[in-house]
Amino acid sequence: MQHNSASPATLLCVAFLSILAATATAQITVTSPTNGSTWTTVPVQLTANVSACAGSSNVTLFEYSINSSPLATPSPNNGTSTQINTTEYRLSAQPSPGAQYTIRFKAWSDAGACAEDDVNITVTGAATTTVANIDDLPNADPPNQASTDQDVWFYVWDSNTDCCMESDTSSYTVSSPALDGQSRLYYADWMANSQTGTPGERYSLNFGDNVANESKTHFIYDTYIYVTDPENIQNLEMDTNQVWNTNGAYVIYGLQCAGPPYSVWQFTTYQGWISSSYPCNPQTWAANQWHHVQIAVHTTGNGNVYYDSVTLDGKTTPFSGMYGNSSRSGPWAQGLLSLNFQLDGINNGEKETTITAYTDGFTMIYW
């Protein structure tokens, strides 16, 4: 009887091919959106997972980006989660035939990189307005006084926080840290006047000034945030303001991640800040890392504001029961749109408190 035996070279080749097959089978799986699909509403749901890269299940980073943008959103737990299950508003709508996007899912393990999984989609619907790279806009002159000019940054002490002495407060563009080559730095240095002082610095910009803006009902506040000393932050506040009429009546869509003793997301009405049941504490945010925040709000008119959801580091939390009348009056032009990025310092017992933060990819989307 004749026996067929494989040569050592053949066996080595088979073993090598088996290793390649093993590393190729467990990669990135995208459930939503499907390649070539068309979405008629925003946001777009992104759902994906990764089981292994280069033969290892120890995933060290899982993220996605859009088109050729250097702004990448990691999965939860600083990108180490193997699941992405989030909503994305930067895939904004445009009238037929729609806007074309490529979503790039990428992952790495301790053994190497996964093959990138690209998904091409079309998003149609009523046109949304996007104001991008807001952090790159210049400062007003002088920047430490309220400004009525559009597209310039200014900053002032928030009179609704406890009074303090400002040693040095500033904001300007820098090249590092940055995701796209340039970001905006926010620096506040306070000395509280009392044992209970919790000072706040409000950084603002007018990003729209058009009567037609009065009819806009949905707003997305979207930015990447980097903090060097989160332990000094009492509240991290992110607001959108909309002026409705010539009398200056306006609404504030105000949301803040409030530190202890609250440690929840708080929203504002004309009566003040109201605590939700949704956890958030800026003092637990990882220092010296970029965090992606998307806040979705809308109004039904008559001053009523609804807080729809927040997405933090790739995890979307839909809000329920967070709404109220948030109308006020002020001396501003009809249709004015503005934003606030506010840093409130901790009660440091009359000792010096500093906060250094950065934003990048700052974008406002509305329709």
Image (cartoon, rainbow, N blue to C red):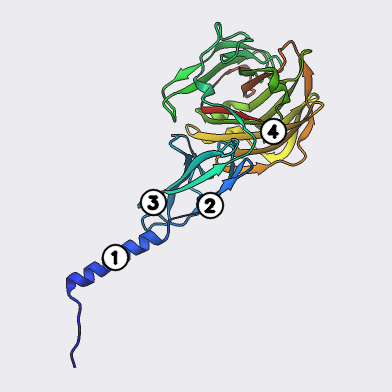
Judge from the rendering whether residue 22 lies leftward or rightward of residue 73; answer left or right: left
The percent position of residue 97, horizontal first and vertical second, equals 56, 39
Whether residue 71 can be seen here: yes
Q: Where's the C terminus, which quadrant?
A: top right
Pointer 3 or 1: first along the chain? 1
156 relative to 278, above or below: above
Q: Which residue is mark 2?
A: 34
Q: Which residue is mark 1?
A: 17
Distance Cα–Cα, label 1 vs label 2 = 30 Å
Q: Amino acid at mark 3?
A: Ala
Instruction: Identify the disc placed on residue 297.
Output: 4
323 relative to 271, above or below: below
Instruction: Give the SS element for disc 1.
Output: helix
Task: Report the residue that reaches farthest toward the front.
Answer: 97
Specify few, some or many for label 2: CA neighbours under 10 Å numbering under 14, 14-19, or 20 or more: few
Most foreground residue, 135 or 194: 135
Q: Disc 2, disc 4: CB below 8 Å?
A: no
Instruction: Identify the disc placed on residue 115.
Output: 3
Instruction: Give the SS element for disc 2.
Output: loop
Whether residue 357 can be seen here: no
